[in-house]
Image (cartoon, rainbow, N blue to C red):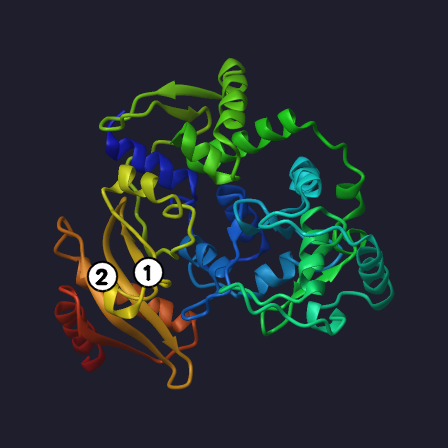
Amino acid sequence: MSLAQARRIALAAQGFVDPLHARPTLRTFDRTLARVGVLQVDSVNVLQRAHYMPLYSRMGPYDTGLLDRAASGPRRRVVEYWAHVQAFMPVELWPVMRHRMEHYRARRGKWSFVPEDATLERALVAEVAARGASTARELDDGLPRSKEHWGWNWSRTRRVLDFLYSVGDLAIAGRTSQFEIRYDLPERVLPAAVLDAPVPSAAQAHVELVRRAARSLGVAAASDLADYYRLGLTDARAALAELVAAGEVEPVQVAGWRRPAYLHRDARLPRRIGARTLLSPFDPVVWERSRTEALFGFRYRIEIYVPAAQRVHGYYVLPFLLGDRLVARLDLKADRRTRTLRVPAAWSEPDAPQETPDELAAELRRLACWLGLDEVEVADRGDLAPSLRAVLSASAAT
């Protein structure tokens, strides 16, 4: 297939040809979740929390309470776990992730070794059982916090809580307004039918995760399929062989790709993609950077952790999807104090069409409205900034 066909298949699989609903509902949410599979969670809030953005990009402006409702209550649809990275995943994936939980238990943690402390582990589970959903701050035993690690100065309590969550002894009930995790017992977070469901073997779980990845990606290389749910490539290839044998995916060749690709049997090839939206840095369309470059010719790096003087495009840069191409990238910031959507930098791609400034201006106004902001202000940085500012100024004057 041609590269243009692969792009349209990939974007259709992600939900960009689904008809927009005038007012998105939980049915819209369910449809979108079925497309993307997982919603990556990230603490950065310079624009909007990462897990809300992929829904906006596919559903349009929506009430963020939809996700909050889907992630709470006795009929919750999603729960946080290490699905891609930290992410909301459908609750039915909990038993599928049991093999991952047992792996973390055997190695005593996900990121680093957590020394065994059975007394503290039992005490924390008992305290959560007695108190209900609680944060690490509420459960902290007052032990001194380590200053050695640059990223997280976790107390011993927090490290053990994170371990208990990683191995499935605790679950995430929700988060506070400060984004602190609220831990609770799995039986108070997940539906009973999910907890009682059969637990597949590791090999069966790998097949299910690759199956879901293939459905969400449409067409993909084996490494893309492995990355979607963070499987080892060897495990993903073994699962992929089963799916090929069963006829669920088929090997294909995409023009310009050096690696073999695999097409899901239900993938659609639309004649065109009518998308016009901004994508979070943590959106499944762009989170695997080598795939983004192979599909769109768009080299993308997030520069949050790069010193300001060394950044090329900006601090929090979002690609702009127009049709089936990524035609621009914008550094964005929601200035909530002044109710302004700020654009510190705007850059066009070499093959951006002539209508890019007009389409992007319309998208920025839509995004600002969804975020509850009144104004859009574009700074001078970037080759697209002058024309974008001119379009916004002209529309404001009419």
Residue 23 visible? The answer is no
Q: Residue at x 61, y 68 (%)?
A: 146
| First-in-chain label (2 vs 1) | 1
**Left or right: residue 314 compared with residue 222:** left
**Left or right: residue 3 compared with residue 103:** left
Q: Amino acid at mark 1?
A: Glu
Which one is nearer the viewer's eye here, 66 or 310?
310
Q: Residue at x 27, y 44 (%)?
A: 324
On the image, the x and y values in percent for residue 390 come to: 14, 73
Q: Residue at x 25, y 58 (%)?
A: 329
On the image, the x and y values in percent for residue 83 come to: 57, 45
Q: Residues within 10 Å of mark 2 (few under 14, many from 20)?
A: few
* Circle 1 SS class: loop
Identify residue for label 2: 312
- Marks 2 and 1 sit apart, C-alpha to C-alpha, by 8 Å
Which one is nearer the viewer's eye here, 124 or 108?
108
On the image, the x and y values in percent for residue 216 come to: 47, 38
Q: Residues within 10 Å of mark 1 (few under 14, many from 20)?
A: some
Q: Relative to 390, is 228 above or below?
A: above
Q: Which mark is residue 303?
A: 1
